[in-house]
């Protein structure tokens, strides 16, 4: 270990000493955290950094006492919070401080938000429990919070349910809930993973501003080293459950001593996208595509307006090519992909390998599903917790290739797991036993096992560590080259888009504002909105005046 002699800050708020966390399953014990020590002082931001499975989230959940007890245990350690050892505190005390003095922003908002409650109910519940607020006071506070975290037209979102919001909007609701009671300590577990680059900058600035106002401490759990550079005062690097290096941000980020730290700092997607080939066969094509969702009001539920999620979009995606689709949450990126896959209703011609499919019903589409695959953004919500990994990956084979024997399916599943960097023996385990990044790799294996021709990749690297991102980009590039796959790559991570996409379209509020070869878009963006996205992503100049995130 290196740089371990940093003096502890004054006015400690949380002091974690020699913390160990074990998980017991049948006769197996997993040592998730091994005698880790770290602390957070009032008003400072401490970053706990490491790849998936390093133990950083487990350490944070231990502070909140939110692990699955008694399967989880603490063989050693204590967690002092303002003089109280939280590991020995009664549950009644923990209920009082959770969501009030200590709040947490979870990584996966779709699994953290209640699907049966509206946004107003969920944010308001926190205020009611800890502040005894009711009625108009709750409404005004919820509106204030939604405005502060950058949700556009919040009055229209109060009655919405989580599934009606984009991934970024759901994460912003989680942030609003966590900040509602102005906590002493905010634990932020990958708080900007699902956010667009411009919104990410706004949220990080918001958190800084709230820290100054409330003298709030923050424990930042992240694998995004760019966020660490912007936010952290001190940094702890975790690997395999151990703290391998810590120090000030400048010490750790600028003069890293541990090989693991240097490895993370050097990890980013590399390589070039496939060369644009206008002679390649067209796999997917659409012209003047529209996806409008009706807005109904009144007793008779009459249509009074439409949400124009996709409005007059045209594209051609060729064999062996990658079309990158960028834009902020709510711009219509995912809706475009779902429309091309015939998973939402749309208006306008859609042709797959020269065959019109826009009027196909579900029965007619079924034989094509093997060739049209999708990797969703949220690996927690897209993987069934009741099925083993092998069952999840082989599900498509059972439907599309019923002639395969059990052993043949096992062999194909094993091959798919190896391609995405997991071991074949993992197919007998369940999704909850894997980290977020590992679950996304399982989702990619599920799509690739059917050997498709067209794959919609909806933020496939958003939940992955930086080094794993680079591996997945390389994997996708190799698979594309080997199978001549056509990718529709949807992402807000412009560095990954640049590495993988040879053509890019930029969407804003359902329309394409700029389109062209990837090199031209990144080297010389013409539209002010594109310039703002690139500025936020690559830390260039301030976004052009008048360009506001939507």
Image: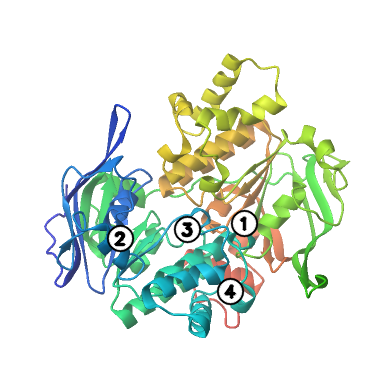
**Mark nearer the N terminus (2 vs 1):** 2
Mark 2, other Cα within 10 Å: few <14 / some 14–19 / many ≥20? many
Q: Answer with the quarter of the image where residue 127 lies.
A: bottom left
Marks 1/4 in contact by CB < 8 Å: the verdict is no
Cα separation between marks 3 and 2: 15 Å
- In front: 385, or 38? 385
Q: Position of residue 210 (x, y in %)?
A: 37, 78
Name the residue beneath numbered marker 1: 519
Residue at the spot 49% in from the left edge and 80% down from the top edge? 138
| Label 3 residue SS | loop
Name the residue beneath numbered marker 4: 549
Looking at the figure, which quarter contains the C terminus? Answer: bottom right
Cα separation between marks 4 and 3: 17 Å
Q: Position of residue 410 (x, y in %)?
A: 55, 20
Name the residue beneath numbered marker 3: 193
Cα separation between marks 2 and 1: 34 Å
């Amino acid at each position: 270990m290196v740089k371990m002699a940093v003096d502890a800050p004054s006015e400690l708020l949380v002091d974690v000493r020699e913390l160990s966390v074990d998980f017991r399953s049948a006769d197996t014990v997993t040592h998730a955290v091994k005698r880790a020590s770290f602390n957070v002082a009032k008003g400072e931001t401490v970053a706990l950094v490491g790849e998936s499975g390093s133990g950083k989230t487990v350490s944070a959940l231990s502070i909140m006492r939110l692990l699955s007890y008694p399967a989880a245990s603490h063989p050693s350690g204590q967690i002092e919070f303002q003089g109280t050892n939280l590991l020995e505190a009664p549950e009644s005390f923990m209920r009082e401080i959770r969501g009030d003095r200590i709040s947490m922003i979870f990584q996966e908002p779709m699994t953290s938000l209640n699907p049966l409650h509206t946004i107003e109910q969920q944010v308001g519940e926190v205020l009611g429990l800890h502040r005894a607020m009711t009625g108009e006071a709750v409404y005004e506070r919820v509106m204030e919070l939604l405005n502060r975290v950058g949700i556009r037209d919040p009055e229209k979102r109060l009655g919405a349910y989580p599934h009606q919001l984009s991934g970024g909007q759901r994460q912003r609701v989680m942030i609003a809930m966590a900040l509602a009671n102005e906590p002493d300590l905010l634990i932020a577990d990958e708080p900007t993973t699902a956010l667009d680059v411009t919104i990410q900058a706004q949220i990080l600035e918001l958190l800084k501003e709230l820290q100054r106002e409330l003298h709030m401490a923050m424990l930042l759990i992240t694998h995004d080293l760019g966020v660490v550079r912007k936010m952290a005062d001190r940094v702890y690097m975790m690997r395999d459950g151990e703290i391998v290096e810590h120090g000030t941000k400048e010490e750790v980020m600028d003069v890293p001593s541990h090989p693991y730290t240097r490895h993370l700092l050097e990890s980013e997607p590399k390589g070039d996208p496939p060369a644009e080939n206008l002679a390649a066969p067209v796999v997917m094509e659409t012209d003047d595509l529209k996806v409008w969702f009706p807005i109904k009001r009144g007793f008779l539920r009459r249509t009074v307006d439409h949400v124009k999620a996709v409005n007059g979009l045209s594209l051609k995606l060729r064999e062996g090519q990658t079309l990158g689709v960028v834009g902020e949450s709510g711009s219509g990126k995912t809706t475009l992909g779902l429309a091309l896959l015939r998973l939402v209703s749309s208006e306008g011609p859609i042709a797959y390998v020269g065959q019109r499919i826009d009027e196909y019903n579900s029965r007619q589409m079924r034989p094509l599903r093997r060739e049209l695959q999708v990797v969703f953004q949220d690996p927690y919500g897209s993987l069934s917790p009741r099925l083993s990994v092998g069952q999840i990956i082989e599900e498509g084979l059972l439907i599309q290739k019923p002639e395969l024997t059990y052993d043949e399916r096992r062999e194909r599943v094993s091959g798919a797991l190896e391609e995405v960097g997991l071991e074949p023996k993992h197919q007998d385990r369940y999704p909850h036993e894997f980290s977020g990044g590992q679950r996304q790799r399982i989702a990619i294996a599920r799509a690739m096992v059917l050997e498709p021709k067209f794959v919609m990749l909806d933020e496939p690297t958003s939940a992955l560590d930086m080094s794993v991102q680079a591996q997945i980009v390389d994997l996708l590039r190799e698979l594309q080259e080997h199978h001549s796959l056509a990718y529709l790559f949807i992402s807000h991570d412009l560095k990954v888009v640049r590495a993988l996409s040879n053509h890019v379209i930029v969407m804003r509020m359902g329309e394409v504002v700029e389109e062209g070869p990837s090199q031209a878009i990144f080297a010389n963006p013409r539209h002010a909105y594109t310039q703002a996205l690139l500025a936020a992503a690559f830390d260039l100049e301030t976004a052009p005046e008048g360009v506001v995130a939507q």
